Image (cartoon, rainbow, N blue to C red):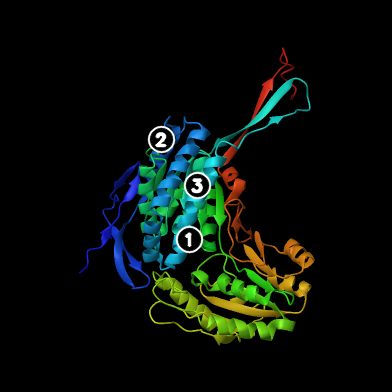
Amino acid sequence: MAVLEKFQNFIDGNFVDPHSGEWFASENPYTQEDWAQIPRGSESDIFAAVDAAAKAFEAPEWGGVTAAMRGAMLNKLADCIAEKGEYLAAIETRDNGKLYSEMKAQLSYIPHIFRYYAGLADKVTGDVVPLDRPDGFAYTRKEPLGVVAAITPWNSPLLLATFKLAPALAAGNTVVLKPSEHASASTLEFAKVFSEAGFPNGVLNVVTGFGHEVGPALVGHDKVEKVAFTGGESGGCAVAQAAGARAKGVLLELGGKSPNIVFEDANLENALNGVIAGIFAASGQTCIAGSRLLVQQSIYEKFLEKLIAKASTARMGDPMKPDTQVGPVTTAAQFTKILECIETAKSEGALCSLGGAPGVGRFVQPTIFTDVTPNMRIAQEEVFGPVLAVIPFRDEEEALAIANNTDYGLAAGVWTENLSRAHRVEKRLKAGTVWVNTYRAFSVQLPFGGYKRSGLGRENGRAAIEEFMETKSVWINLAPKFPNPFIMQ
């Protein structure tokens, strides 16, 4: 029997065994074999991690340094990550089954995110505020919150952790990070890089385990000032409810049912590639998946024929191989859910025009449903798999009505060569990100988040660092004599 690699939690600058003395297996989704042992964290581990983070926040090695010094640490961290990017990407692929080419691309971009916030760290300033009275001088100050809890999912563990870590650390906070129990290994390896980069003990802490066993202790801890969560809607609502009971802030990035809208005047070859990238890349396991395709009726048959022909050539296989285009589904539970969604769509009358069945191992064939109506479950509920629902529309008004007819509002795509149409449609789409003539494009400079049930707050850009800071107003009285104390000044 193969010896599994054994990981430890990262608390107060040290790798330590879980208090429970228990580990659980992590499975390689492609081989469906266990490859690592992950610490089964408990409330005791969370308490130790939060205490370490709280102590580090107050310590002069972190709490007493300037914003420029924090930026220098983040720049050094970026250099260390760049040196180990391919190694970390390989661990991610082994742990969650996503294509190595995609994980490598993400790891190559992560240093850039840290460098962006390194540069921003000393540029978030308060203001001198001109008051409406002559005897006062006032200014605002931006200050870190304290201890931040970050909870991340299994589909892109390190990229989504970076979305939280980089701005939170640049702002001067300390972090307790809890990755998904389905993909924890890369995050624990990531913690080693923080030590190598010279971060003070306790600034970052990583505790792994099952959500129901460690989540409530982390979210409910009195020393945690804010919770940043990426994951499913039900989990996000539970986090928001628990945090709200203690009047602490939340940053939520949840699900989506994003429309990809192709108008008759679009560059059809570009649109075709964008639609396929939007749903079948990452095996559809992404919150921004363009899982609803809206095609104008005048080009519907022609576009659909080309789409099915191209999608049918997608190569499923070993995610480590460069020619693989569709990898396995990460978890057994998600695999079952995707197949159930496919059967539900068939039972509601949608026509399965491509795929619709499992492949060998834990694969789901790239699947396309036609004859879909906007109110079918396949057009309303997030599948989180390589399943596309295609819906025709007559004109802009109908396209917008269909696109906005969901509880989600994370992203949308618009394909048109008409500049006026692009702006008209973009303005009326209820989505946090709208891509015009592209899809799944990303830049750290641009805020990311959702409308409606897709989340609260924004990650990336300047908006993200503001999420992890408080604004303090300071009032200096210039009057030589304090006025009547019984009258509000």
Left or right side of 476 for 12 = left
Q: Is residue 441 above or below residue 393?
A: above
Q: Amino acid at mark 1?
A: Ala
Q: CA distance from mark 1 to mark 2?
A: 36 Å
Residue 338 appears left or right of 195:
right
How packed is label 2: few (under 14 Cα within 10 Å), some, or many (20 or more)?
many
Which disc number belongs to residue 486? Answer: none
Q: Mark 1 = which residue?
A: 105
Can residue 222 be seen here? no
Find residue 229 and report its horizontal and vertical position in percent: 51, 54
Residue at (26% x, 53% y) in the render: 21
Q: Is residue 39 above or below residue 248?
A: below
Secondary structure of residue under mark 1: helix
- Left/right placement of residue 478 relative to residue 315 reads right
Q: Amino acid at mark 2?
A: Lys
Which quarter shows the N terminus? bottom left
Rounded to the nearest angstrom, the CA distance separating label 3 from label 1 is: 15 Å
Q: Which mark is residue 55?
A: 2
| Label 3 vs 2, first from the N-terminus | 2
Q: Place residue 248 in its image quadrant.
A: top right
* Along the line of sight, the residue nearer the viewer: 459 or 83: 83
